[in-house]
Image: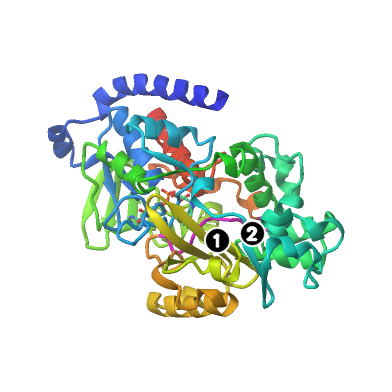
């Protein structure tokens, strides 16, 4: 609550001052044309970060032009409106502490919300190394090679997948949500594997936990990044507080876009940004040029790497943009033609230690579907066509869960690793990358500014994207 009040006060003050600033720099259309500029500020990317940047600057009286490479707003928020059951392929769950998202939802007039726990079937069935079983059988299973208290971790609800939380340090070594960036946290920026071993995790536990990390290997992930994630999850109050928009998560970015005075310029793929002392020039793949006083690049790092920036970023910032990785993710959605769980007596949802990962059975007023969520970095599905993935995924599921044969049908694939406007699912950090780069990806470079969830210092996911939009807007308003 303190965070929200402070943020609101700061924004109010800035908006009040910006009203004054705007008379000088928030130019009318005529004055803008005369100045040779298309807007005060150009924002690249109409995901939540870019949309919140544009709206906050517009609220403060600046003219903003939002350029978007694809033909829709929302970026990694994507409801598959045309697929039966209306599955969510991207950002969906709003945590209880998502102050910015929730106050924006209020501003948009509210949406019907559903509790995540009311839409997903829990517990999960478990598949380990060729055997499918109820989660309750795991503690005594001969396949259970875990040791001591690891054996019964998670109980009949979560099983071996609760090992991650079991080894999360409590209390967190991070006091604040942004403490991961403090110099005193740098010694924690070792490999997550090293950290887990220091806590006594067995080899079998390391394999299970690896399966649940973005890299598929605890050795190649920063332990400090994981601590940041755990601290964030702790702040959010766990899965009980998760809510989704019943009419589809995409209604949220679409609602913000409707508040913008200028239409988003779709199918506008930005390839270069040039800045000098007078302003910025933004170049597109189609050869168009736009001019403004400042620019905000609110695009994920895999896309930012491909935008030519002039003058070049300082060496450390350029290295951070080049090297900070994103994890893979392929989503496969299935229709349930017949309730296969009535045939084998196991729950509809399934956790596996196979590359195919997890499968959630969702059931709500909108319909029913299965969501197979594949994060394994070596999954061959990353490089296959959607049709090939559907075929392979159906076979894989039929193999480990024979009751699904003839009772499910693949409906859609969303391959975030191949999605041209993201090329990955989410940002993470390799061991040592937090100590080396801190949050340098958020640093302004003259008239060029950066937003996106990867630049957020406190929150993560959709709330991190909103935070970054607010932070960059304030940064610009203070400079304008
Ligand atoms: C499968 C999945 C599940 C998730 N679940 C959750 C969840 O439950 N809760 C949660 O809080 N978060 C979740 N997230 C994360 C959340 O969706 C993201 O953190 C957030 O949407 C990121 O917003 P963004 O604006 O920073 O980036 P993006 O949404 O990636 O937006 C970037 C925009 O930039 C555009 N763009 C890229 N390059 C260019 C270019 N060169 N020129 C012009 N435009 C360009 C893209 O088209 C895109 O619209 C999930 C993400 C995924 C993929």
Kind of element beneath mark 2? loop
Position of 300 with respect to 58 (left or right) is: right
Question: Which one is nearer the viewer's eye here, 288 or 84?
Answer: 84
Magenta region, mostly helix, strand or loop?
A: loop
Question: Which one is nearer the viewer's eye here, 178 or 272?
Answer: 178
Question: Are the residues at dot 1 and dot 2 in contact (C-beta closer than 8 Å)?
Answer: yes
Question: Which one is nearer the viewer's eye here, 238 or 466?
Answer: 238
Position of 79 with respect to 94 (left or right) is: left
Q: Give the range drawn in magenta.
A: 422-432
Kind of element beneath mark 1? loop
Position of 325 with respect to 302 (left or right) is: right
The C terminus lies in which quarter of the figure?
Answer: top left
Q: In which quarter of the image is residue 420?
A: bottom left
Q: Is residue 191 among the parts visible in the rendering?
A: no
> Residue 113: x and y, percent?
42, 40
Tell me if residue 391 comes above or below residue 259 in the rendering: below
Badge 1 crowding class, 10 Å Cα cut-off, few under 14, some 14 to 19, many 20 or more, is: some
> Residue 210: x and y, percent?
68, 64
Question: Which one is nearer the viewer's eye here, 58 or 284?
Answer: 58
Q: Does the magenta stretch include residue 426?
A: yes
Give the residue pinned by disc 1.
Answer: 325
Give the residue pinned by disc 2.
Answer: 430
Identify the residue at image location x=12%, y=34%. 30
Please tell me the numbered disc located at residue 253.
none
């Amino acid at each position: 609550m303190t965070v929200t009040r402070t943020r609101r006060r700061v924004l109010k003050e800035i908006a009040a001052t910006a009203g004054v600033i705007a008379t000088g720099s928030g130019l009318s259309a005529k004055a803008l044309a005369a100045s040779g500029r298309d807007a005060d500020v150009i924002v690249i990317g109409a995901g939540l970060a870019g949309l919140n940047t544009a709206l906050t600057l517009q609220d403060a009286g600046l003219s903003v032009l939002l350029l978007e490479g694809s033909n829709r707003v929302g970026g990694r928020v994507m409801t598959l409106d045309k697929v039966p059951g209306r599955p969510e392929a991207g950002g969906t769950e709003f945590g209880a502490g998502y102050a910015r998202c929730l106050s924006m939802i209020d501003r948009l007039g509210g949406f019907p919300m559903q509790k995540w726990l009311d839409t997903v079937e829990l517990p999960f069935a478990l598949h380990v190394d060729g055997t499918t079983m109820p989660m309750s059988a795991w503690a005594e299973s001969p396949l259970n090679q875990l040791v001591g208290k690891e054996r019964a971790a998670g109980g009949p609800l979560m099983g071996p997948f609760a090992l991650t939380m079991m080894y999360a340090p409590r209390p967190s070594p991070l006091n604040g949500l942004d403490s991961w960036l403090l110099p005193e946290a740098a010694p924690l920026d070792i490999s997550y594997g090293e950290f887990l071993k220091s806590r006594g995790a067995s080899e079998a536990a390391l394999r299970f936990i690896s399966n649940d990390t973005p890299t598929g290997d605890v050795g190649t992930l920063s332990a400090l990044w994981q601590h940041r994630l755990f601290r964030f999850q702790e702040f959010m109050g766990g899965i009980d507080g998760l809510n989704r928009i019943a009419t589809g998560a995409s209604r949220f970015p679409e609602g913000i876009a409707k508040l913008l005075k200028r239409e988003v310029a779709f199918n506008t793929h930005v390839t270069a940004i040039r800045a000098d002392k007078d302003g910025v020039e933004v170049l597109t793949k189609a050869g168009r040029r736009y001019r403004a006083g400042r620019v905000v690049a609110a695009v994920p790092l895999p896309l930012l790497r491909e935008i030519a920036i002039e003058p070049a970023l300082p060496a450390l910032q350029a290295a951070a943009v080049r090297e900070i990785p994103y994890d893979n993710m392929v989503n496969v959605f299935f229709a349930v033609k017949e309730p296969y769980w009535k045939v084998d007596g196991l729950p509809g949802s399934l956790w596996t230690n196979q590359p195919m990962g997890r499968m959630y059975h969702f059931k709500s007023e909108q319909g029913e579907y299965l969501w197979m969520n594949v994060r394994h970095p070596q999954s061959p599905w990353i490089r296959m066509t959607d049709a090939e993935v559907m075929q392979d995924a159906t076979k894989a599921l039929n193999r480990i869960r024979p009751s699904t044969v003839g009772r499910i049908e693949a409906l859609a694939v969303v391959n975030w690793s191949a999605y041209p406007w993201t090329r990955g699912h989410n940002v993470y950090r390799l061991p040592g990358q937090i100590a080396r780069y801190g949050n340098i990806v958020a640093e302004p470079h003259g008239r060029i500014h950066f937003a996106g969830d990867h630049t957020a210092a406190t929150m993560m996911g959709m709330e991190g994207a909103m935070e970054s939009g607010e932070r960059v807007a304030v940064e610009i308003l203070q400079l304008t």
